[in-house]
Image (tube, rainbow, N blue to C red):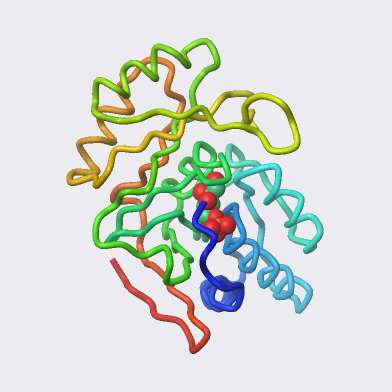
Amino acid sequence: MKQGGSDAAKRAAGEAAAETVEDGDVVGLGTGSTAAHAIRAVGRQVDAGLDVVGVPTSFQSRELAREAGIPLADLDAVRVDLAIDGADEVAGGDLVKGGGAAHAREKIVDASADRFLVVADPTKEAETLSYPVPLEVLPAARTTVADSVRELGGDPDLRRAERKDGPVVTDNGNLVLDCAFGEIADPEALATSLSALPGVVEHGLFVGVADAVYVGSEDGVTVRDL
Ligand SMILES: O=C[C@H](O)[C@H](O)[C@H](O)COP(=O)(O)O
């Protein structure tokens, strides 16, 4: 994932988005270093008496939410009012996500929310998406999906684990292909093509899902409503 942004910028975005959480909300809790600031801020609001329930998008966000004292629910038991989640790249309202391999669960939670707020630092913003698109794939489909990605003009790369020999294995037990397509002129068309590939569990293109983008900086936060 893009790591250039400062922690202060990420914190500003995450905390500003968390301020919009209202009493009684069911909140989708995103994954990554920017969403983590929002989760901690929601935890502080819970400490102060706010009545909210969180729906985590990954093992990591569940752990963080537990530490922060946020009561949790599974997505099949609730309806999400507001989701707050990071992104690896943002162009207009379109996103690439999945730098932490959490995009499959993130998309379920973010897309189901009444309102989805993206939290980012300025290094994530781009004119056109070009960040490699992560595909979560069933292990048995790795080579066939990689072949199909090449036919679509992409360059697939199996994501390798750090501090473990072999590939990254997602929270769902699958593998990740990071697929570079260069500049993505038509994200919606690419998203449709990727969704159609047998064995692709989910891809990291989030097109038309976000409702607002909170971009933090050392000086404050810019909110772009979509
Ligand atoms: O799978 C991970 C997620 O999509 C993250 O939200 C994304 O990678 C952004 O993470 P960060 O805020 O750490 O840059």
Q: Give left or right: position of 88 versus 58.
A: left
Q: Give left or right: position of 38 versus 98.
A: right
Question: Does residue 21 appear in the picture of this structure?
Answer: no
Q: Residue furthest bottom?
A: 219
Q: Residue at x 27, y 43 (%)?
A: 182
Q: Residue at x 51, y 27 (%)?
A: 158
Q: Report how many numbered discs are placed on residues in the image.
A: 0
Residue 154: % across, % down: 30, 30
Residue 166: % across, % down: 66, 24
Q: Give left or right: position of 144 versus 2.
A: left
Q: Give left or right: position of 53 versus 221.
A: right
Question: Does residue 194 appear in the picture of this structure?
Answer: yes
Q: Residue at x 42, y 41 (%)?
A: 204
In this rendering, the answer to whether 48 lies above or below 83 is below
In this rendering, the answer to whether 146 lies above or below 205 is above
Residue sitting nearer the eye, 183 or 204: 183
Name the quarter where the C terminus is drawn.
bottom left
Residue 113: % across, % down: 45, 52
Residue sitting nearer the eye, 142 or 72: 142
Residue 56: % across, % down: 64, 48
Q: Where, by quadrant of the figure, is residue 126 drawn?
A: bottom left
